Image (cartoon, grey):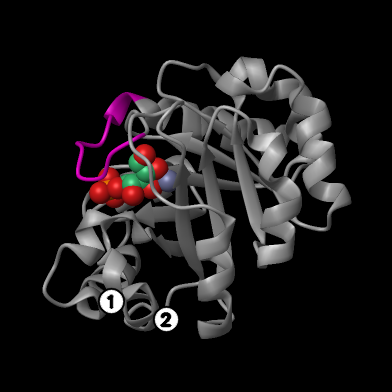
Amino acid sequence: MKLAPSILSADFANLATEIEKVSNAEYIHIDIMDGHFVNNLTFGANVVQALRPYTKQVFDCHLMVTNPEDMLNALKEAGADIVGVHYEVCPHLHRTLAKIKELGMKSEVVINPATPVSVIEPVLTMVDQVLVMTVDPGLGGQGFLQEMLEKVSQLAEYKQENGLDFDIEVDGGINDQTIRLAKRAGATVAVAGSYIFKARNPAERLKILQESLNQGKMR
Ligand code: DX5
Ligand code: ZN
């Protein structure tokens, strides 16, 4: 399983030093919020660009914005690797995902807790990653919604039945316990924000997550 520390819970005044602390993770998860699709307002492509020289890790950009299409060119320029758009704000989802691919980035579709897997089935052949939100988007530090595990299993099954190989990512409420449940359900990437960055030692927390995944057999 790949780990994706979310800088939403990091110290915004020292982002470059914060990401250095989690250099062992495969991804850096970047939550772009517009104060419209969600209440919070974070950062945009300019911050992605400013961080790019500090690491070669995969920049996993989660767009919680109302008009994600408007941002795609700038994100490409900034050095984004994966771009995730919410099903709930994309009336032309097929076109938006195709544009991400055309620009040479990896495409991801994201579903809110209240959105079922069935609605994204038509685009599953064209995505590199599916993000199942395990909290309602907008804030760090919320509790993991166990019911979402069913959607992860559904996707894992769909993937196998149809010979597809997209990653399945979970985001929200991930800690050393919930990460095991997500893995068991079939998730291949886990985002963790507050569990890593609200701790005194983020590197140690990352290691605990890795160890928790390797620990014994899961029932
Ligand atoms: C929430 C964001 C998450 C957030 C997760 O809208 O998409 O990436 O950082 O935070 P935790 O891990 O604290 O639930
Ligand atoms: Zn996120």
Report crowding for label 2: few under 14, some 14 to 19, many 20 or more residues within 10 A (C-alpha): some
Dot 2 falls on a residue whose secondary structure is loop
**On the rendered structure, is 24 left or right of 213?**
right
Front residue (pair 219, 75)? 75
Task: Classify mark 1: residues with Cα within 10 Å, few (<14), some (14-19) or many (20+).
Answer: some
Label 1 close to label 2 by CB (< 8 Å): yes
Residue 136 position in % (x across, y down) = 34, 28
Nearer to us in this view, 134 or 30: 30
Q: What secondary structure is found at the residue carrying circle 1?
A: helix
As drawn, the label of residue 24 is 2
* Left or right relative to 83: residue 179: left
Range of the magenta residues? 138-147
Q: Position of residue 201 (x, y in %)?
A: 16, 77
> Which amino acid is tagged 2?
Asn
Q: Is residue 171 above or below residue 53?
A: above
Question: Is residue 56 shown left or right of residue 203?
Answer: right
What residue appears at the point 67 percent right and 44 percent down from the top-left corner? 71
Residue at (59% x, 22% y) in the render: 89
In which image quadrant can residue 17 be found? bottom left
User: Which of the 4 quarters of the picture holds residue 63?
Assistant: top right
Residue 207 circle label: 1
User: Front-most of 67 and 126?
Assistant: 67
> How many dots with numbers?
2
Q: Which residue type does callout 1 highlight?
A: Lys
Compute the Cα span from label 1 to label 2.
9 Å
Mark with earlier residue (1, 2) = 2
- Determine the residue located farthest toward the right in the rendered image: 102
Please indicate, yes or no, whether residue 111 appears anywhere in the rendered image. Answer: yes
At 25% from the left edge and 36% from the top edge, which residue is drawn?
A: 144
Q: Determine the residue positioned at 61% across, 36% down.
A: 85
Tell me where residue 114 appears, x and y as whole percent. 42, 16
Q: Is residue 70 above or below residue 49?
A: above
